[in-house]
Image (spheres, helix red, strand yellow):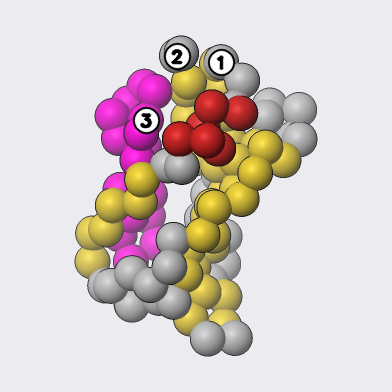
Amino acid sequence: MQAHGVPDPDPRRLALELSLPVDDVVLKLWTPALVLIGVQHSGPLGRGWQSLSLDPALWARAPQGLVYASLEARQGARQSAPVATLRLFRLN
C-alpha cells in the first residue's frame, strides 16, 4: 500500500494505492510527541488508487504544523504491514 496527502500541504484526503481489495483501512493520527490524536476507519475499498477523506472532526483536533499518520489495511483477520509513516502538515 502507498499513500499520499492531497493536497500537499494541508491535506483534506489521502490517495491510497491498494494491491488488493480490503475490508478496512485504519488511519491513526499522531502528534510529533507521538500522542494519538484519533483513529478513523475507511470501510471497504477496492484495488487500485482510492481516495480516503480525512474526518473533519479528527483533523480539527490535530495541532497546527506537523502531524504523523499511520495506515494499516485489513482483510478479514489479516492485516497488512504498516505503511511508512506519513508526514502531514496542517496549516489552519
Residue at the extreme front of the image, as rendered: 57
| Image location of residue 9, percent across then percent down | 36, 22
Q: Residue at x 45, y 35 (%)?
A: 56
Where does label 1 land, which residue?
Answer: 64
Residue 32 or residue 40, whichever sits in front = 40
Magenta segment = 1-20
Residue 85, can we see it? yes
Other-residue count near label 2 (Cα within 10 Å), few / some / many at <14 / 14–19 / ≥20:
few
Where does label 3 land, which residue?
Answer: 11
* Distance Cα–Cα, label 3 vs label 2: 9 Å
Q: Mark 1 falls on what kind of element?
A: loop
Where does label 2 land, which residue?
Answer: 91
- Could you say which quadrant of the image residue 11 lies in? top left
Q: Mark 3 falls on what kind of element?
A: loop
Q: Is residue 32 above or below residue 54?
A: above
Residue 28 or residue 79, whichever sits in front = 28
CB-based contact (under 8 Å), mark 2 and mark 1: yes
Determine whether, in the image, residue 50 is placed left or right of residue 26: left
- The number of discs equals 3
Q: Residue at x 32, y 26 (%)?
A: 8
> Amino acid type of disc 3?
Pro
Q: Earlier in the sequence, mark 3 or mark 2?
A: 3
* Distance Cα–Cα, label 3 vs label 1: 12 Å
Residue 19, can we see it? no
Determine whether, in the image, residue 5 is placed left or right of residue 58: left
- In the rendered image, which quarter contains the N terminus? bottom left
Q: Residue at x 72, y 40 (%)?
A: 36
Q: Earlier in the sequence, mark 3 or mark 1?
A: 3
